[in-house]
Amino acid sequence: MVDVVSMNEFEQKTGGGVPLRRKMTIFEGIPYECGCGETHIFSPSQTRVYCELGGRDYVFLCLNEYVTLVKVKGFSSHKFKSLLSAKLIDPIEDKNRQIDRMSDKESEVEFL
């Protein structure tokens, strides 16, 4: 299982990266392990490449809002090795966002 860390630690260890510069079609169909607990199949039309870290390292963003640092292994046949992952949205920030979406009636608290 890929190591899941805080977004702060993920950013410190990955150093930010740069926008994607290469075509990713050669990696279509290759599975990668994600921090959300699922194994995703890479597809250039479905997988968002969050950034490129140079060489053969990329950060993918899944629909469950996890970013995963993957390293490309192999030359003639490629594989992904997931190195690190983080929840893109902090759980506290996410809870505050959910509260903001609640109606006034739902967010009222009754005191006895």
Image (tube, helix red, strand yellow):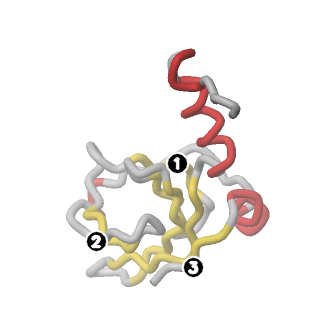
Amino acid carrying label 1: it is: Tyr
Q: Which of marks 3 and 1 is in front?
A: 3
Q: Nearer the viewer, residue 106 or 14?
A: 106
Work out whether mark 3 precedes mark 1 in sequence or the reverse, and give the earlier one: 3
Residue of label 1: 50
Mark 2–mark 3 contact, CB under 8 Å?
Answer: no
Residue of label 3: 3
Q: In this view, does 65 lie to the left or right of 108?
A: left
Work out whether mark 2 precedes mark 3 in sequence or the reverse, and give the earlier one: 3
Which residue appears at 56% of the width and 50% of the height?
Answer: 51
Which residue appears at 25% of the width and 64% of the height?
Answer: 41
Residue 34 locus on image (x, y percent):
42, 68
Q: Distance between the residues labelled 2 and 3?
A: 17 Å
* Element type at mark 2: strand
Which residue appears at 47% of the width and 76% of the height?
Answer: 82
Residue of label 2: 31
Sort mark 2 into few (<14), some (14-19) or many (20+) by Cα contacts within 10 Å: some
Q: Is residue 61 left or right of residue 77?
A: right
Number of marks:
3
Q: Distance between the residues labelled 3 and 1?
A: 18 Å
Quadrant occupied by the C terminus: top right
Quadrant occupied by the N terminus: bottom left
Q: Nearer the viewer, residue 111 or 59?
A: 111
Examine the rendered structure and indicate whether residue 99 appears above or below residue 38: above
Amino acid carrying label 2: it is: Pro
Q: Distance between the residues labelled 2 and 1?
A: 17 Å
Q: Which of marks 2 and 3 is in front?
A: 3
Which residue appears at 28% of the width and 71% of the height?
Answer: 31
Q: Nearer the viewer, residue 13 or 9?
A: 9
